[in-house]
Amino acid sequence: MTDDPRDVQGNAGPEVEGAGEASEPSTGAHMPTMERSVMGTLGVALMGAGLRSARPIQKIVLGSVGAGLAAMAATGRNPLANALKIRQSADGDTLVSDAVTIGRPAAELYAVWRDLAGLPRLMTHLERVEVLSETRSRWTVKAPTGDVSWEAEITADVPGERLAWSSLPGEGIENSGEVLFRPAPGDRGTELIVRLRYRPPGGTTGAVIARIAGEEPAQQLRDDLMRFKREQEFGSEPTTEGQSSGREPATSSSPKAGQA
Amino acid sequence: MKAIIWQGVNKVGVENVPDPALLLPTDAIIKVTSTAICGSDLHLLDGVIPSMEKGDILGHEFMGEVVEVGRDVKKLSVGDRVVVPFNLACGVCDPCRRGLFSACDNSNPNHRMAEALYGAVSGGGLFGYSHMYGGYAGGQAQYVRVPFADVGPHKIESGLRDEQVLFLTDIFPTGYQAAENCSIVPGRDVVAVFGAGPVGQFAARSAQMLGAAHVIVIDRVQGRLAMAEAAGCQTINYEQDDVLVALREATGGRGPDHVIDAVGMEAHGHGPGALVDTAKQKLKLSFDRITALRWAILSCGKGGTVSMPGVYGGLIDKLPMGAAFAKGLTFKMGQTHTHRHIAPLLGRIEAGEIDPSFVITHRASLDQAPELYKTFRDKHDGCVKVVLNPWA
């Protein structure tokens, strides 16, 4: 991978253009048709089970959960996604973005991100990135169901300013994203903005389940950005891993007493 | 080693735990020669600070001798005698470079926990003060791991005793910053201090050092008020007097130019407001009891400052914001930027302007600490400040 300045912005697909627009309507989006029909079937089945149940509590719980699912399927809207502030585009993609200010020059930070093979060090949920060519790469993430992999293409590359990529059609999880490097006012370094867009497996429901399980990119992104900031500014992350506490058994002798 | 362990709400004990080890090349290990119980430790004892875990080592006011340094530590060597700020700061992030050490971006490994409660910000880590503040093991122990060892610890090279410099780690800078935040006009401004605990005592004396024309201290415990009187402060016992009337009278009807709330979230107070606060806190509808803050706002003179070194935890309602608006008050608050105060305050101690050991009423071993936590909490036996010797 070279650091040659180049601009392949001409390749930017519509998805990346969309990811760049912060003002896009973001919640209460329509669920894909497949998700709606699955949810509708499940809702009706639960309502039926509720009605058949002999126990009043079950009648109420199953009946109302079923009615809720059926209503979500009928309207195509998922109020849980709204309540959890999961942002979605009009066509059902999940949008994730966050930002951090880092006290280093934009060129340095850009160089770290442009080394795609090194990205798994920044983003801990990334298993590996294999660089295939100047603009092509293969990304692998760990998922509960096993590794998921896709080929991605760099769609915009403005050294020190912006890097955007998009998965190729029909590959693993459809996704795209961009990183912006913007000088911060004063001597505060660089504002780093990351915007991701992906189509979660299981649609809106999948995104809700992932969020509740703490496995959703919005949460991971925040942690990754803070980790990156700390490595760039201080050189390491703070840690308390392995410190002494009353939760671990004491050693019988006190080796430090000798040095004291 | 021996350490004071948080064992649950209202349960503190002495346990044998593993010695600390260097975890990062920027760490140092310090043999603790003196440590203290802080008023804010009582919030942990009472269980009003969330995210404590059984087995946590307590303590954030401590000093001692360096016994081990990581390979990247440049300013400290084995054998150095140091005081250690209670908060952790990386020294290189934007807040640290602006002197806002307690707001360090990088020293709290559990930033997400703090952000969940406080929005997209987290303060720096604190020693021995809940996992929301980083979950760092504290210094009420025989040894302690000190991260960011080139940034926090300050060497003591003069022959001052531990008791004269120990409080540079927290309560002296905390009281001082509270007074400094008032922007006192020397010879003119009258300062009232709510709370005559250790921080209130240092706030009152710092206000005097910064030139306050008159300092008034408010509390309900006679021994604490006597300690403030010994420094030349006027005192008001709010259980015997109507505090708002007494403060008007003491200031010719103007109200104090600045008011320091050195009480914070667990104010006692009395009257219907205090009862409502207590009930809400017990029902977990609120973290904070705000009698002292209400009185501070209501008593403060026009254009004055309400300075808040006392800790608040969550959301507050029934705050007299109309009064604050009508009088054009300025609010100043926040954790102490300890790092920036240590050198100048050490200079004042060395110059003989103040001997911080005046505040100590109890000296004990670690084994006696659990009992003294309760004595301090209940303000029994004239207890204002407890200093522990981990090797006694």
Image (cartoon, rainbow, N blue to C red):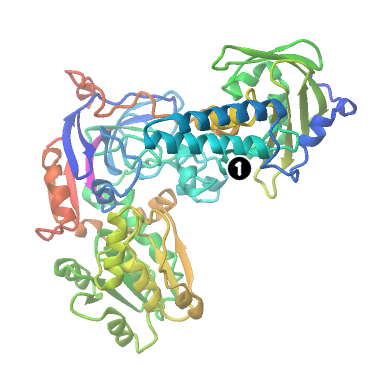
Read off the chain for label 1: A
**A165 left or right of A109?**
right
Q: Is residue A76 above or below residue B326?
A: above
Q: Nearer the viewer, residue B200 or A71?
A: A71
Can residue B148 be spotted in the picture?
no
With B225 as the anchor, is A83 left or right in this view?
right
Image coords of residue A123 (percent x, y): 60, 24
Quadrant housing residue B315: bottom left
Left or right of A203: which side holds B159? left
| Residue at (77% x, 16% y) in the render | A170
In the rendering, at what x and y percent does residue A24 appear?
Answer: 75, 43
Q: Residue furthest bottom?
A: B252
Q: In the rendered view of the protein, which quadrant contains the N terminus of chain B? A: top left
Residue holding disc 1 = A82
Identify the residue shown where x is 37% and y is 40%.
B153
Q: Residues within 10 Å of mark 1 (few under 14, many from 20)?
A: some
Q: Position of residue B122 (x, y in %)?
A: 49, 44
Q: Would you place residue B84 above or below residue B280 in this image?
A: above
Q: Position of residue B64 (x, y in %)?
A: 27, 38
Q: Is residue B34 magenta?
A: yes
Span highlighted in magenta in the image? B31-38
